[in-house]
Amino acid sequence: MESLKAHTTKVSTNESHQDEVIHEIFEIIKNDAIVSQELLKSNIEDKSIEFFRTLLNDPQKAIAEMSSNIDELIFNAVEELFTKKFKSSKKVGKLFLQSTGKNAIHFYLVLKKDTESTRSTFYDYLDGYDELALSNRVEVHLHFIGDDLASKLKPETKQAF
């Protein structure tokens, strides 16, 4: 009976984590929609507006473009979710990231206080992400580095904060 209770707690925790991630994704989408609406009022077109115009004029082309853009949107959302999570933790002094194509992101974290407990916080978040189907589309890798190694990262690695 005890293992069933532990399993139920884990499922509830996982669903709660999924709800949090879904909420964050909706916030990103909502913010993008608000920006597009404001641009349209000023007769300025962004990618979203261009897509809807294409959808109205050439639905097949729009669907083909949409499918090729989905991976990029997912990738950017995952990158933003993790970056926000790391920044809000107040445990990360510097964050660098490097993408390998559109299916993997490497985060290089310089922790303010590098302890096993601090690292565990981020591994727990990564474990929650790995349980999502989304993790099959975008791999996330965490690397904990010292401040001295930050200057030796590859040039294509960008600093997020």
Image: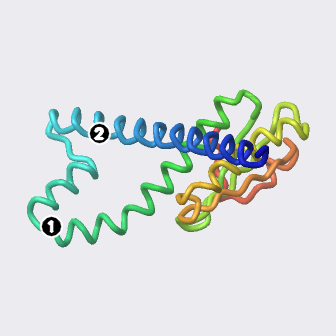
Residue in the foreground of this view, choosing between 88 and 112:
88
Q: Position of residue 145 (x, y in %)?
A: 84, 48
Q: Amino acid at mark 1?
A: Pro
Look at 34% across and 37% down and name the residue there: 30
Residue in the foreground of this view, choosing between 145 and 122:
122
Look at 67% across and 55% down and name the residue there: 157
The C terminus lies in quadrant: top right
Q: CA distance from mark 2 to mark 1?
A: 20 Å
Residue 115 vertical position relative to residue 55 in the rendered view, above or below: above
Do callouts 2 and 1 mark residues in contact (Cβ within 8 Å)?
no
Left or right? Give the position of 118 relative to 48: right
- State which quadrant residue 117 falls in: top right
Left or right? Give the position of 138 relative to 38: right
Counting residues from the start of the chain, the first of labels 2 and 1 encountered is: 2
Q: Position of residue 1 (x, y in %)?
A: 76, 46
In this view, which residue lies farthest toward the right? Answer: 115
Q: Position of residue 82 (x, y in %)?
A: 61, 44
In this view, which residue lies farthest toward the left? Answer: 57
Left or right? Give the position of 116 relative to 101: right
Crowd tier of the residue under label 1, counting other residues whose Cα lies within 10 Å: few below 14, some 14–19, many 20 or above: some
Give the SS element for disc 1: helix
Look at 20% across and 71% down and name the residue there: 61
Left or right? Give the position of 92 relative to 130: right
Tell me how the rendering is colored. rainbow
Look at 77% across and 38% down and name the residue there: 121
Q: Amino acid at mark 2?
A: Ala
Residue placed under numbered mark 1 in the picture: 59
Crowd tier of the residue under label 2, counting other residues whose Cα lies within 10 Å: few below 14, some 14–19, many 20 or above: some
Q: Position of residue 132 (x, y in %)?
A: 57, 55
Residue placed under numbered mark 2 in the picture: 33
- State which quadrant residue 93 falls in: top right
Give the SS element for disc 2: helix
